Amino acid sequence: MNTNKTIRIIGGSLRNSKIKVVEEGIKPTTDRIRVTLFNWLQTIIPNTRVLDLFAGSGILGLETLSRGSKSVTFIEKSKKASIALAQQLERFKFNNYENIHIDAIQFLEQENKETSFDLIFLDPPYGDYSIDQILNLILMNNWISKKGFVYYESNIALEIGLDRSLWNIYRESKAGKVYYYLLCCN
């Protein structure tokens, strides 16, 4: 395993800061995709509550903290990745976050009794989870605010079966073999 793999934060107050990727199976969102994504999100991020599901390295949530989000909740089932993320957050001296070591589906199956999230990052390991199941849990258990956004990334194009009465594809693109979308909750 390459223990020296790093990625960088591409914008905000922590621009060019390096982040360690500690697990071989973690495939962080590439710089190229993050540039496009955060151009889409630039007016949305300030003062938003963010949920980073399948956080891995935490790069998506860290990008939003760097750009002024109100708070970020990181969800990661790998203990090793969760500990490494905690160390990164401590290094940057953030205090507006939660780092929870739990499987994302188990987390979403709980009923949310807190304020809903304005932006949810959904970048699961490719092929391991059903996007329909995840989107249903997000809605059913009140994890997303009205008119909130979900970023979804996969190696497979989003199925046509997306319930358009519940979700609107706000933006979409493809880079290499990666499809990515910004969905808006109707």
Image: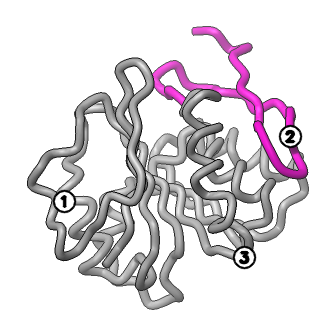
Tell me which residue sits at (17%, 75%) in the image: 165
Determine whether the residue tagged by mark 3 lies in a helix, strand or loop: loop
User: Looking at the figure, which quarter contains the C terminus?
Assistant: bottom left
Q: Residue type at mark 2?
A: Arg
Q: Which residue position holds label 1?
A: 133
Q: What secondary structure is the stretch in magenta mostly built from?
A: loop
Q: Residue type at mark 1?
A: Gln
Tell me which residue sits at (42%, 44%) in the image: 123
Q: Nearer the viewer, mark 3 or mark 1?
A: 3
4 sits left or right of 154 in the view: right
Q: Is residue 185 magenta?
A: no
Q: Disc 2 versus disc 1: distance between alpha carbons?
A: 35 Å
Q: Which residue position holds label 2?
A: 15
Q: Disc 2 versus disc 3: distance between alpha carbons?
A: 19 Å
Disc on the earlier residue, 2 or 3: 2
Q: What residue range appears in magenta?
A: 1-28
Q: Residue type at mark 3?
A: Asn
Which residue extends farthest top?
A: 1
Q: Is residue 23 magenta?
A: yes
Verify CB contact (< 8 Å) between mark 2 and mark 3. Answer: no
- Indicate the position of residue 72 as horizontal and vertical percent values: 65, 65
177 sits left or right of 116 in the view: left
Looking at this view, is 155 or 182 the one in front?
Answer: 182
Determine whether the residue tagged by mark 1 lies in a helix, strand or loop: helix
Q: Quadrant of residue 83?
A: top right
Tell me which residue sits at (48%, 55%) in the image: 121
Q: Which residue position holds label 3?
A: 47
